[in-house]
Image (cartoon, coloured by chain):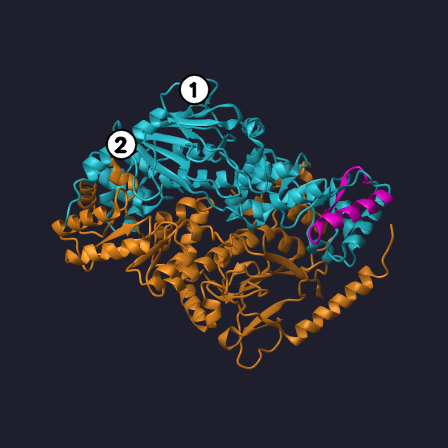
Chain colours: A orange, B cyan
Amino acid sequence: MSEARKTDLYELTMAMSYVREEMTAPATFSLFVRDLPAERGFLVAAGLEPALDYLAGYRIGPDDVDAFAAALGRPARDLVPLLGTAFDGEVRAVPEGTVVFANEPLIEVTAPLPVAQLVETYVLNLLSHQTAVASKAARCVLAGAGRPVMDFGMRRTHGLQAGYDAARVGALVGFGGTSNVEAAAALGLPAIGTMAHSYVEAFHTEEAAFHAFARAHPGGPVTFLVDTYDTDAGVRTAARVIKSRGLGGNSAVRLDSGDLGALAARARRILDAAGLTRVRIVASGGLDEYRVNRLVREGAPIDVYAVGTKVGVSADAPYLDSAYKLVAYDGRPVMKLSSAKITAPGSKQIFRGQGCSDVIALRHEQAPSGHRPLMRPVMHGGRRMSEAPPLREAHERFAADVAQLPPEARRITGPLAPRPVFSDRLKSLTDQVRNRIESEILAPPERV
Amino acid sequence: MSEARKTDLYELTMAMSYVREEMTAPATFSLFVRDLPAERGFLVAAGLEPALDYLAGYRIGPDDVDAFAAALGRPARDLVPLLGTAFDGEVRAVPEGTVVFANEPLIEVTAPLPVAQLVETYVLNLLSHQTAVASKAARCVLAGAGRPVMDFGMRRTHGLQAGYDAARVGALVGFGGTSNVEAAAALGLPAIGTMAHSYVEAFHTEEAAFHAFARAHPGGPVTFLVDTYDTDAGVRTAARVIKSRGLGGNSAVRLDSGDLGALAARARRILDAAGLTRVRIVASGGLDEYRVNRLVREGAPIDVYAVGTKVGVSADAPYLDSAYKLVAYDGRPVMKLSSAKITAPGSKQIFRGQGCSDVIALRHEQAPSGHRPLMRPVMHGGRRMSEAPPLREAHERFAADVAQLPPEARRITGPLAPRPVFSDRLKSLTDQVRNRIESEILAPPERV
């Protein structure tokens, strides 16, 4: 199916009007997050690459026109002016993996006004969702403090595609693997699979289950889930099976419930006493960065953390306060004035200094001394300027950026995000546009 | 692409072992929610119909085997025993739209053990996600107290498919429309589209924008977004345009920011003073059931509530504590014992009495007097027993069920969910299985 009909109806009602009014001059929209969620010291830009794929393939076909007409309750002929519309614009963006803050544009789209408007819903959706999940996952990696963190989120994400996206952005921020078969196969990620409680229950005894599992996966790796009935007994059973089958170098036990720190300490003692010092301990079950952080700080002997639902849905911040705002039309900078949602006009650039001291400036300003620009051109004339880079590149960017963060932004509890400043020229333009709106549009107040 | 590879790896590692051990006797898995989120007095079952589509189409093809092998890092020949696997089982479920509570099975799947296991991830994902969002949306309908509630969530759901799903389950619980073009066209739902702030900003004045919008949508319906610059001035401008174009019978103003109750009251006065008593007021912007409830109770003159992000992601409860648990294998009831996550064994039925006084019983028990069974057969031999019913049917079921809820379950703040009781026979079976596990599997504790 064409992706063009995955859109909010108002994109169509506006585009129809723009076409009718011949308002097809270039417009620039800027996508940014107004405020970070309370428990975020930074965001990790994600979702750009699938958004560029969408833009590159955007085309309104005859079936879309029929769907549009059905949704609008109008004859298809009213929609014919939109038939064949493709995305033919320019895109500048921060690459995936970049650490960003409030008000910093993740992407700016410049295209004929109806086209730039039509793609809003899809682009806003992808970048908002994937940036939210990547930012949550990044905090898990920080909490793990060097221990591998794995993605087990697929079973309770918001649909299967969201599970795929979570696996992908998890890899982007440095997860060591994923349970997601589709994502692992498509992206070449390490896949992690153990067993469910149901597996143990299907056998007459836990020991029979563990032996059968080892038989099916000769040589390993094998991970035995030990908390189906009684965790300590399960660890002892696993140790017996591991020893008897010579799997000590390529096996693990998984704890999925209870007081994971205490259970891990007891499991380690049981395994070590059996001479199985290389058998690893995997923890799962409702983990997120807060619990991983506590377990790591307590010194829990857990070798691998498998995070799931709470990370896959970014449970404490399942959405971002993102916006896709018109900042210029036909050479004229524009902005929104009402209430607290004031936006800054004009196409922008982010300049990054040491320690993430960022300046949000107008696009063509000179970089302040010691600062480098973060946004770069990624599409020209509706075409990608390069192929999607490997995830590894985005990961390296993320790792470098995160190392620059001030410690208070990296904190798991009560993080403080750096606040970018606006350049003098951007502040001055904001004042000018505000004054123009107040004098030309709002004064004198007109009466009905 | 085949859907079979959208799965957690452990489904494969277990299935491979089951096939090897010739453990292909029938297994029954039961999917339920252990505990309701704090702010939920009930859940609305959703996601069954797409889950049945998945099961009916489930088939492991050659490409899937290749993907499985890649994820497992094993040669494809190791996966060949799974090639051609299709879902050939039985499914019993509560129909979509049914109001359910903690521990009540939404669906029970009975199939050869490897098959029933392989479909876990997908089925659990669909039912958990869609039930979570439907339950949130249902509370919005209750909060609206008869006023139309619309879905504007697509822009910040977790991917575009999640936006479609939210539109669908919104319709299921009685939303009056959606902004989602794809869902509106595919499901025949009323589509709602207004204009964005960018639209107003693209014109030199707000009045020019409103006139142009009306020109593009002659006869209406037209909704004017009035808070781009100054809300009161915007309402006056809209009133002027509506009067001059004779749109008083088919137009609305939309408030999207600020103190919606106070702004709506002023907007109503301005419109009424202009003789535009039939022009409606639409509110949007960060709405959820809590804010809708407050606005309705304050008597805000808002005619239509458009809820968005917070409902589309079920922001205060973005996941459910759901489980897909083996309850019987090869005629033997099974359960999990460790920690707090004890599950009740055996295939079940839910019997509903007056006021949602529910009894969770074994499948073949007699209904207690005055109770009716909620679960029904929906698939036989891997085939649907009937086509997917129209959404209207699910909506009617929801409406009837919700009317039966005790008032404290319907409350928006501090709801209390009814607690189903377990039948004596189910309690007795639970004790038996627990005793068997404790004597056969756990005692005497074995040492390494």
Q: As rendered, which of B332 and A387 lies closer to the eye?
A: B332
Percent coordinates x, y for residue B352 in the rendering? 47, 25
- Quarter occupied by residue A358: bottom right
In the rendered structure, the residue with mark 2 lies on which chain?
Answer: B
Tell me, yes or no, if residue A203 can be seen here: no
Identify whether B223 is placed above or below A144: above
In the rendered image, the vertical position of residue A431 relative to residue B38, given as above or below: below
**Is B73 left, or right, of B127 in this rendering?**
left
> Which residue lies at the image location 59% right of the left edge and 50% below the top edge?
A121
Q: Residue at x 61, y 36 (%)?
A: B142
Residue bearing the label numbered 1: B368
In percent of the image, x 81 and y 60: which residue is there?
A: A442
Q: x, y (%) of residue B257?
A: 69, 53
Which residue is nearer to you in this view: B313 or A226?
A226
How many neighbours does mark 2 have within 10 angstroms: few (below 14), some (14-19), or many (20 or more)? many
Tell me if residue A439 is in the magenta stretch: no
* Amino acid found under the numbered disc labelled 2: Val
Q: Residue B35 at what x, y percent from top left? A: 44, 40
* Marking on residue B433: 2
Part of the protein shown in magenta: B247-274
Residue drawn at the location 71% of the way across and 52% of the way down: B259
Could you say which quadrant of the image residue A328 lies in?
A: bottom right
- Name above or below for residue A313 compared with residue B440: below
The front one of B109 and B381 is: B109
Amino acid beneath label 1: Pro
